[in-house]
Image (spheres, helix red, strand yellow):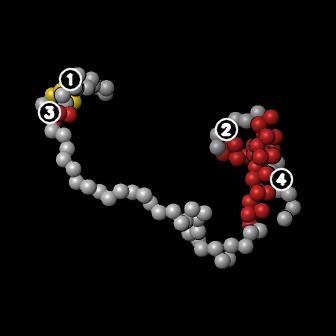
């Protein structure tokens, strides 16, 4: 594994400013440690030999979709759909206006 990656507080502060975030000193320390740990993990992943792994490989690649076939069915009539509507206008639900 490569040398430990350290993200200093200045780097975190610069990214925070670019993101328009205001971070406390405690958060700067916390995030610099967390980002360093993330970079270490990425280094570990980069050490894995993936030359013989297809780009679309997935641990669940043997699963098949379990979708059912589409079947045409009849639908409800407008009268049936609107039977319990508190308010209706012609073949539509009537709702209070929200935007003037």
Circle 3/circle 2 CB separation < 8 Å: no
Label disc, if present, on residue 6 of the rendered structure: 4
Image coordinates of residue 58 in percent, x first then y, are: 58, 64
Q: Which residue is mark 3?
A: 79
Which of marks 2 and 4 precedes in the sequence? 4
In the rendered image of this protein, does residue 18 appear above or below residue 26?
A: below
Label disc, if present, on residue 21 of the rendered structure: 2
C-alpha gap between disc 1 and disc 4 = 64 Å
Would residue 52 be visible to someone looking at this image? Answer: yes
C-alpha gap between disc 4 and disc 2 = 21 Å
- Nearer to us of marks 3 and 1 is 3
C-alpha gap between disc 1 and disc 2 = 48 Å
Label disc, if present, on residue 16 of the rendered structure: none
Q: Residues within 10 Å of mark 4 (few under 14, many from 20)?
A: some
C-alpha gap between disc 3 and disc 1 = 13 Å
Between 17 and 99, which is closer to the camera in this rendering?
A: 99
In the rendered image of this protein, does residue 17 appear above or below residue 94?
A: below
Image coordinates of residue 56 in percent, x first then y, are: 56, 69
Check the picture and name the quadrant holding the C terminus.
top left
Which of marks 4 and 1 precedes in the sequence? 4
Between 73 and 1, which is closer to the camera in this rendering?
A: 73
Q: Quadrant of residue 27?
A: top right
Which of marks 2 and 3 precedes in the sequence? 2
Q: Which residue is mark 1?
A: 87
Identify which residue is drawn at 21% across, 50% down: 73
């Amino acid at each position: 594994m490569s040398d430990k990656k350290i993200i200093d507080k200045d780097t975190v502060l610069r990214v925070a400013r670019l993101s328009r975030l205001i971070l406390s000193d405690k958060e700067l320390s916390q995030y610099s440690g967390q980002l360093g740990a993330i970079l270490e993990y990425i280094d570990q992943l980069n050490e894995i030999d993936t030359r013989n792994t297809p780009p679309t490989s997935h641990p669940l690649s043997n699963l098949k979709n379990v979708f059912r076939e589409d079947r045409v069915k009849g639908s409800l009539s407008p009268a049936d759909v609107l039977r319990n509507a508190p308010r209706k206008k012609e073949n539509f639900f009537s709702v209070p206006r929200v935007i003037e």
